């Protein structure tokens, strides 16, 4: 292939944009490149002799180019040092914040006692009784304590030889036994 022959629509478009004579290519891509070139020819030209640096400074209200040497810019030395110190301070605070100790993990629930989970139920008393009997049938020790406002507090303890169905049933309630095999479940009304 020679460099003079167009090799596809992209080449035709570039040749049209470059101003090649119209008799060399008649494709749609060539015509589109020619239209774009015609549009670029209408861009107004800027008189570069008027846009010198002194004129720019005069228009900005700074007067003569001699003022350009004074460190009044935003990137002057004192501002660069202040910005650097601010960046270091932000990084230091961020690192301290990142390294802060985490609170002890709590089982499900907001602001509750560690190891206490919450279960929202439509009928908390009936659901707590059904759950307690179900867990007892699988070998878990369940003690229910009345709580204020129609809530029920279940203290669940499961020994190491406890049935795996206890853990599965608690997982359905989005909670689990603590490593010591206990959990307190507060059953609340929705």
Image (cartoon, grey):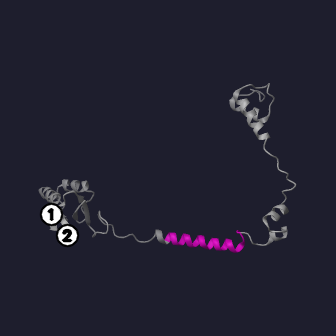
Is residue 104 found left or right of 154 in the rendered image? Answer: right
Q: Which residue is tagged 2?
A: 148
Q: CA distance from mark 1 to mark 2?
A: 19 Å
Secondary structure under the numbered disc 2 in the rendered image: helix
Expressed as whole percent of the image width and height from the top left, the position of residue 70 reads: 79, 72
Q: Is residue 86 depicted above or below 51 in this figure?
A: below
Q: Is residue 67 depicted above or below 20 in this figure?
A: below
* Front position in the image: 34 or 131: 34
Number of numbered markers: 2
Residue 162 covered by magenta stretch: no
Tell me if mark 1 has few (under 14), some (14-19) or many (20+) residues whose alpha carbon lies within 10 angstroms of its own: many
Magenta segment boundaries in residue numbering: 74-95
Which quadrant of the rendered structure holds the C terminus? bottom left
Residue 67: quarter of image:
bottom right
Magenta stretch prevailing secondary structure = helix
Sequence-wise, which precedes: disc 1 or disc 2? 1
Q: Which residue is tagged 1?
A: 142
Residue that appears at 27% across and 57% down: 174
Residue that appears at 68% across and 72% down: 79
């Amino acid at each position: 292939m020679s460099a003079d022959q167009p090799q596809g629509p992209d080449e035709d478009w570039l040749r049209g944009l470059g101003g090649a004579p119209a008799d060399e290519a008649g494709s749609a891509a060539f015509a589109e490149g020619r239209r774009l070139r015609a549009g670029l020819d209408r861009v107004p030209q800027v008189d570069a002799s008027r846009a010198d640096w002194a004129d720019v400074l005069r228009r900005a209200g700074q007067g003569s180019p001699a003022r350009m040497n004074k460190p009044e810019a935003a990137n002057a030395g004192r501002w660069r040092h202040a910005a650097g110190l601010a960046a270091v301070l932000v990084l230091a605070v961020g690192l301290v914040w990142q390294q802060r100790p985490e609170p002890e993990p709590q089982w499900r629930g907001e602001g509750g006692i560690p190891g206490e989970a919450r279960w929202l139920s439509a009928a908390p008393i009936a659901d707590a009784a059904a759950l307690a009997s179900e867990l007892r049938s699988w070998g878990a020790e369940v003690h229910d304590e009345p709580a204020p406002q129609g809530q029920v507090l279940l203290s669940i303890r499961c020994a190491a030889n406890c049935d795996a169905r206890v853990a599965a049933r608690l997982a359905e309630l989005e909670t689990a036994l603590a490593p010591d095999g206990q959990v307190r479940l507060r059953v609340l009304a929705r």
